[in-house]
Image: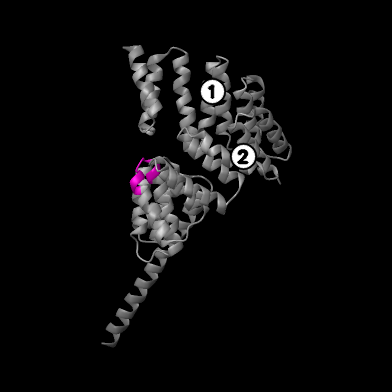
Amino acid sequence: MKSRKILCIFAACAGMVFLAGCKGEEQKVFEQAEKDFSQGSYEYALAGYETCAANGWKDARAYRGAGICNMRLGNDEAAVSDFTNALNCEKVEKALEKDILSYRATAQWNLGMYSEAMADCQTLALEHSMDADTYYLTGKVALSMDSYGEASDNFEQAYGEDATYDMAIRIYEAYLERGMEADGTRYLEAALASEPKNAEDYCDRGRAYYYMADYTSAQKELIEASNKGSLEALLLLGRVYQAQNDISNARSMYQEYVSKEEACASGYNGLVLCDIAEGKYEDALTNINNGLPTSTTEEMQDLLFNEIVVYEKQLDFPKALEKAKEYLEMFPEDGAALKEVKFLQTRIG
């Protein structure tokens, strides 16, 4: 009996060592996923988070990580599923729950699921403390549902909590997407009343003036930001010059940005637009290929859409249609691309 008891104890201990080993391995996978995420390697991070979630290791955080990766990769439907799985996990901390609800509402908004997004926003308001970001999110969702009064109230709360250039610009951009620039401009004007303190402030002021089509003021602020070391200011200066049809100076700004910024896909896209404006279509295709390896999902979308435009400008309608169909497989909700496909089909037909 004694030997059997010792054998059972040994087996139990062996099992504990095995489980500890598994947990040690999952911990390493989770830490590597976090590292991959911080470096922008979302595919690798996603695989790591999904492995952890499948094995029940830090499941709520793992599902959250997978959801954010899917959002960054443009997979919003998968992201909503991940965030829902995260919220259904046991013992989700209050702060983590708030964070996941905010992300899920954003993914739902991206998918046009406005009622579902608003339901999450209402849960945030009822069960969590609201802050500038959650007020802003609720305002953006309300605006998409044509609830203008509710949107305005939430945007005012958001700016009241965070009266910064960044928040003013975010609110303006939300209104801009709905063709309501006048409603957003007052936030830009309010932000511009404050004094700039650093390069980032000058850059944000330049962006605000750019949105207001005050290109002289935008140029002045962005040059100051650039002199203080802001690389983003170079990108915005390119857009300012482009808006004035000064392609030569715009190209110079984009080239300087590309030479100094490692993740420079937006700079290459700026060069593509300059190439298209000057009819340099082969150069445009080269710059598209140069920009893709370091692009985010949004930057990739811009580059690939412009690739369609380049082939259309070259009157290579079959190639443009081929690229448009490939584009829609990646970004099926893009209405402009759907119209482009229909147009190209008429040119070929």
Query: Does 159 appear above or below 3?
Result: above
Q: Which element is circle 2 on?
A: helix
Whether residue 301 is visible here, answered yes or no, is yes
Mark 1: few, some, or many residues within 10 Å (few <14, many ≥20)?
few
The C terminus lies in quadrant: top left
Q: Main secondary structure of the magenta part?
A: helix
Q: Nearer the viewer, mark 1 or mark 2?
A: 2
Type of residue at label 2?
Glu
x and y percentages locating residue 256 in the rendered image: 67, 30
The label on residue 72 is none
Considering depth in this image, is 101 or 148 the residue closer to the camera?
148
Q: Residue at x 49, y 45 (%)?
A: 41
Query: Does 101 appear above or below 220?
Result: below
Report the number of discs.
Answer: 2
Q: Residue furthest front?
A: 149
Whether residue 44 is visible here, answered yes or no, is no
Q: Which element is circle 1 on?
A: helix
Q: Is residue 216 magenta?
A: no
Residue 227 sits in quarter: top right
Considering depth in this image, is 11 or 302 the residue closer to the camera?
302
Query: According to the image, label 1 marks what residue?
Result: 286
x and y percentages locating residue 175 in the rendered image: 49, 38
Residue 62 sits in quarter: bottom left
Position of 39 with respect to 2 (left or right) is right
Disc 1 to disc 2, C-alpha distance: 40 Å
Q: Residue furthest left?
A: 1
- The magenta region covers 108-116
Residue 8 sits in quarter: bottom left
Query: According to the image, label 2 marks what residue?
Result: 189
The N terminus lies in quadrant: bottom left
Type of residue at label 1?
Thr
